[in-house]
Amino acid sequence: MGSPVEHGAQAERTRLAWRRTVLSGTVCALLLFRLAFERGLDEAGALGLALSLLCWLVLLLVAQRRIRAMDRQDPVAVARTLAVVTITGVLMGLLGVLLILW
């Protein structure tokens, strides 16, 4: 395995940005959990909890994969990663709206 690519502070800023993304996803998931428990944990609330947990786990795994990929000489493409992050963010938002309106 080759030595890690060094681009000065750029790599560290990108790692921090991915960590902030996961942190904001964690806050969203916790707010969805709170909302589900405040309204009573019925079937819709349990489904919302399960889906928000799944979205958060996907976000966490994708971010960790991207952070590790930055150490490689030739990192993988970002397009799929950004699509997954966008989908998880939209799903968390929709889950919040559905839990409020249900």
Image: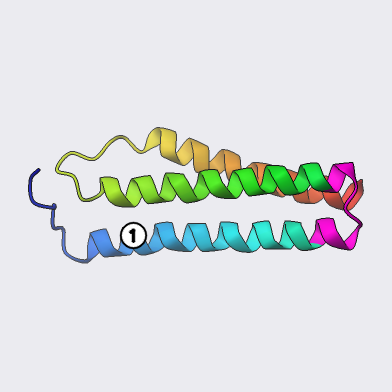
Residue positioned 58% across, 56% down in the render: 25
Residue positioned 13% across, 53% down in the render: 4
Q: Quadrant of residue 51?
A: top right
Q: Eyeballing the image, is 81 above or below 96?
A: above
- Name the spot of residue 90 as percent of width and height, x first: 65, 43
Task: Give the class, few, some or many, for how many residues have Cα within 10 Å of label 1's Cα (few <14, many ≥20).
Answer: some
Q: Eyeballing the image, is 38 above or below 57?
A: below
64 to the left or right of 51: left
- Name the spot of residue 101 as percent of width and height, x first: 90, 48
29 to the left or right of 21: right
- Quadrant assignment for the N terminus: top left
- Name the spot of residue 55 as percent of width and height, x first: 61, 44
63 to the left or right of 37: left
Q: Nearer the viewer, residue 38 or 7?
A: 38
- Name the spot of residue 85 as percent of width and height, x first: 51, 44
Q: Name the residue under label 1.
A: 15
Magenta span includes 41: yes
The kind of residue tagged 1 is Arg
The stretch in magenta equals: 35-45
